[in-house]
Image (cartoon, grey):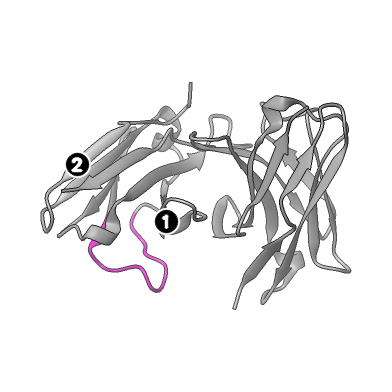
Amino acid sequence: SSELTQDPTVSVALGQTVRITCQGDSLRSYPASWYQQKPGQAPILVIYDKNKRPSGIPDRFSGFSSGNTASLTITGAQAEDEADYYCSSRGSGGNHLVFGGGTKLTVL
Amino acid sequence: EVQLVQSGAEVKKPGESLKISCKGSGYTFTSYWTGWVRQMPGKGLEWMGIIYPTDSDIRYSPSFQGQVTISADKSTTTAYLQWSSLKASDTAMYYCVRQDGWLPDYWGQGTLVIVSS
């Protein structure tokens, strides 16, 4: 089992707001980052250092972290946001990286 | 523009050896870690390990220590992932990543490895 836990599936109506969560003890010490992966494509970074967006990532994507939980929020979900989302952080002990199991987001 | 270009798909038999590559360009290769991430069919992402090309400092995930070897050639800005004896369970997509500290920020296009008799 992963050190970071995510809900396997989440759905959202088009244009509505959705939050994807990630839980793990290491999140108390290290910041989370989030990746979006569409079918047949490599993942891309969408949020890092809890709530920073790389250039080119729409501002409808935001991040938040408190205690052992990090979250990715999409405000006004679009059809193109349908994808798998993975959280990541340093693992316990700090000498390796871990990914959550992933959340499949469906936009209805 | 940062680019990580990986070698092509491979089909191998169990017990064979394999070395796949990842060429970085558009940035100073020796100033960043280069890592590898496995994605088995229909499954999630698994971090395998990283190398710092300047001094070949390598960190492996406990899950992959002893199972694979990571190396790099700074003269050609290329990182490698190799197996000495493949198993069917090594069948997966393998992504290389540029890692800024502990943050994978750029990903290669992936190399599909199929191990089948």
In front: B80, or B100? B80
Q: Residue at x 43, y 33 (%)?
A: A101
Q: Give the left or right position of residue B36, taking residue A46 as reference.
A: right
Q: Main secondary structure of the magenta part?
A: loop
Q: Is residue A58 magenta?
A: yes
Please rate how many residues cluster around mark 2, counting C-alpha atoms within 10 Å: few if below 14, some from 14 to 19, many from 20. some
Q: Give the left or right position of residue A43, taking residue A28 as reference.
A: right
Q: Residue at x 75, y 50 (%)?
A: B51
Given the image, on which type of amino acid does mark 1 rest? Tyr
| Residue A16 on image: x %, y % | 10, 54
Residue B61 location, quadrant: top right
- Of all chains, the one bearing label 1 is A
Where A21 falls versus B5 (above or below)? above
| Residue B115 on image: x %, y % | 74, 33
* Same subunit, tags 2 and 1: yes
- Of all chains, the one bearing label 2 is A
Picture disc at residue A11: 2
Going from the N terminus, do you reach mark 2 or mark 1 first?
2
| Residue B108 on image: x %, y % | 62, 59
Q: Residue at x 49, y 52 (%)?
A: A40
Q: Residue at x 19, y 41 (%)?
A: A11
- The residue where tag 1 is placed is A48
Viewer-side label of 2, 1: 2
Given the image, on which type of amino acid does mark 2 rest? Ser
Q: Which residues are magenta?
A: A51-62
Please rate how many residues cluster around mark 1, counting C-alpha atoms within 10 Å: few if below 14, some from 14 to 19, many from 20. many
Residue A8 location, quadrant: top left
